[in-house]
Image: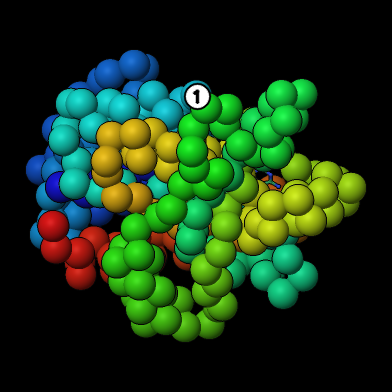
């Protein structure tokens, strides 16, 4: 069974609407909707915003629902000139940009005493998502690259440039790396799918308000197609 996490209602509302026979289980202040989507068994949940909510949510999916894979749908700020509002980024891997133990000699982003610098998304899920995206969102570009996450809405050029130069990220958001790490710890394959709502610069807050809904729709379209093709 697939677990599907969105941080905000706008990112999961349509999925919940299209689900059949769903049962709701409330755990840790989150409602887990289990049922069928496009004929496949799934659990859809709104985690709430930020890394802690995302990690707790992932752990519940592992413990209570024994999901076979986790997909995170949502929106993000672009970190590259060529990645435009509306485009989609599929995670190759994820890093937490606000993890900083440089005082102990670790590179910024590195979690002390863990061997991984970044957490690798599942290649099969990523390939399936790339294929599906071309079919259901033919009018936009799909990129595959690193997603950088932190408990921060990035809305200035200096921070954006630092993220790009330091981590070579493709987009930034506030949950993906936490979902990735929690999935890794539970040996669950995962993929982060993010549609771009803004450029993470001085225009980010305005663009975000204007484009969040449209961007979220691209990600949801893609999820629906993946669910249809996915076999666990
Ligand atoms: N989600 C969407 N846009 C974002 C941004 N600029 N920073 C962090 N999270 C985001």
Where residue 64 sits: x, y (%)? 18, 26
Q: Nearer the viewer, residue 202 or 128?
A: 128
Q: Compared to 49, does 92 lie above or below?
A: below
Quadrant including the C terminus: bottom left
Is the shortest distance between ligand 1 and the CB of mark 1 under 8 Å? Answer: no
Residue marked by disc 1: 52
Say whether residue 48 is left or right of residue 225: right
Relative to 168, residue 66 above or below: above
Residue 47: x percent and y percent?
A: 42, 31
Q: Residue at x 38, y 33 (%)?
A: 182
- Secondary element type, mark 1: helix
Give how far across and how far down residue 175 sits, in percent.
Answer: 52, 38
Left or right, 174 with respect to 47, comes to: right
Residue 98 visible at all: no
The residue lying at 25 percent from left, 49 percent from top is 69
| Residue at 28% across, 34% down | 186
Image position, residue 62 (x, y; %): 24, 32
């Amino acid at each position: 069974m697939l677990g599907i996490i969105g941080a905000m209602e706008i990112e999961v509302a349509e999925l919940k609407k299209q689900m059949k026979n769903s049962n709701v289980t409330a755990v840790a202040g989150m409602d887990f909707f289990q049922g069928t989507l496009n004929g496949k068994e799934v659990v859809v949940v709104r985690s709430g915003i930020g890394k802690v909510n995302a990690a707790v949510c992932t752990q519940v999916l592992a413990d209570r629902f024994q999901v076979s894979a986790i997909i995170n749908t949502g929106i993000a700020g672009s970190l590259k000139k060529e990645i435009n509002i509306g485009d989609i980024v599929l995670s190759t891997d994820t890093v937490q940009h606000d993890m900083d133990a440089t005082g102990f000699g670790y590179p910024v982003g590195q979690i002390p005493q863990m061997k991984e610098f970044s957490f690798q998304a599942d290649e099969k899920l990523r390939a399936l998502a790339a294929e599906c995206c071309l079919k259901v969102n033919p009018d936009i570009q799909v990129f595959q690259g690193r997603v950088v996450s932190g408990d921060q809405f990035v809305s200035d050029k200096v921070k954006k440039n630092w993220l790009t130069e330091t981590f070579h990220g493709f987009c930034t958001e506030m949950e993906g790396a936490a979902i990735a790490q929690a999935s890794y710890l539970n040996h669950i394959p995962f993929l982060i799918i993010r549609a771009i709502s803004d450029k993470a610069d001085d225009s980010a807050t305005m663009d975000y308000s204007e484009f969040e809904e449209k961007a979220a729709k691209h990600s949801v379209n893609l999820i629906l197609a993946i669910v249809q093709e996915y076999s666990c």
